[in-house]
Image (cartoon, rainbow, N blue to C red):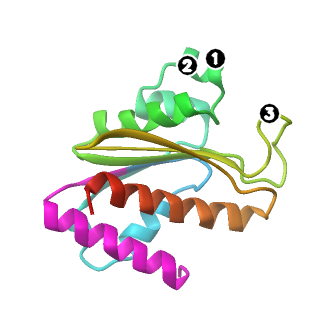
Amino acid sequence: MFPDDIEALARKVVEAASARGLMIAAAESCTGGLVSAALTSVAGSSAVVERGFVTYSNAAKSELLEIPAALIERHGAVSEAVARAMADGALACSSAQVSVAVTGIAGPGGGSTGKPVGLVHFAAAGPGGLIHVERRFGDIGREAVRLDSVRVALELLLDRIGA
């Protein structure tokens, strides 16, 4: 279902979380559940994948992850502030100890000068704290932006798990 490198990364995440007894939650916007799908494609992932939130709309971000609407209005859904709030919200609204959040503009439309197509904000939280990463993949096509985002998200989970 996924490219070999994504399958291998997902397997590493599941194995690392299992070895450390950690549960994972994913909060996804532009990836639409692909991070969760990659993780759950690994046999045995039910031992570590606690839940996934597909929060494509601003309302879903507020309702499911408890992100204040004012924060989204002030910074925009595609922002460091919202990515961090999504990662925190995924932990607060689950029983997981590690989370990853993805929010971006996959294209082909929706971009602007300040927030172009291919801009994706990531955040991940875990025992080592909360981190943020911004990637500007460029206008490389919707599927490529989404798959590259899955790769970054899985790497961030590995980082937060401490693998």
Residue indicated by mark 1: 74
Q: How many marks?
A: 3
Q: Mark 2 falls on what kind of element?
A: helix
Contact, mark 2 vs mark 1 (Cβ under 8 Å):
yes
State the image coordinates of residue 92 (x, y, percent, origin top left). Answer: 29, 33
For the magenta stretch, what is the residue range? 1-25
Residue indicated by mark 3: 114
Residue at x 81%, y 43% (from the top left corner) = 110
Q: In this view, does 86 lie above or below 9?
A: above
Contact, mark 3 vs mark 2 (Cβ under 8 Å):
no
| Left or right of 6, for residue 19 | left
Residue at x 43%, y 62% (from the top left corner) = 154
Residue indicated by mark 2: 71
Label 2 to label 1: alpha-carbon separation: 5 Å
State the image coordinates of residue 46 (x, y, percent, origin top left). Answer: 24, 67
Q: In front here: 154 or 32?
A: 154
State the image coordinates of residue 91 (x, y, percent, origin top left). Answer: 30, 39
Q: Is residue 65 above or below residue 151?
A: above
Q: Mark 3 falls on what kind of element?
A: loop
| Left or right of 136, for residue 97 | left
Residue type of the residue flagged with mark 3: Gly
Q: Which numbered disc, 1 or 3, marks the residue that appears first in the sequence?
A: 1
Residue at x 63%, y 23% (from the top left corner) = 75
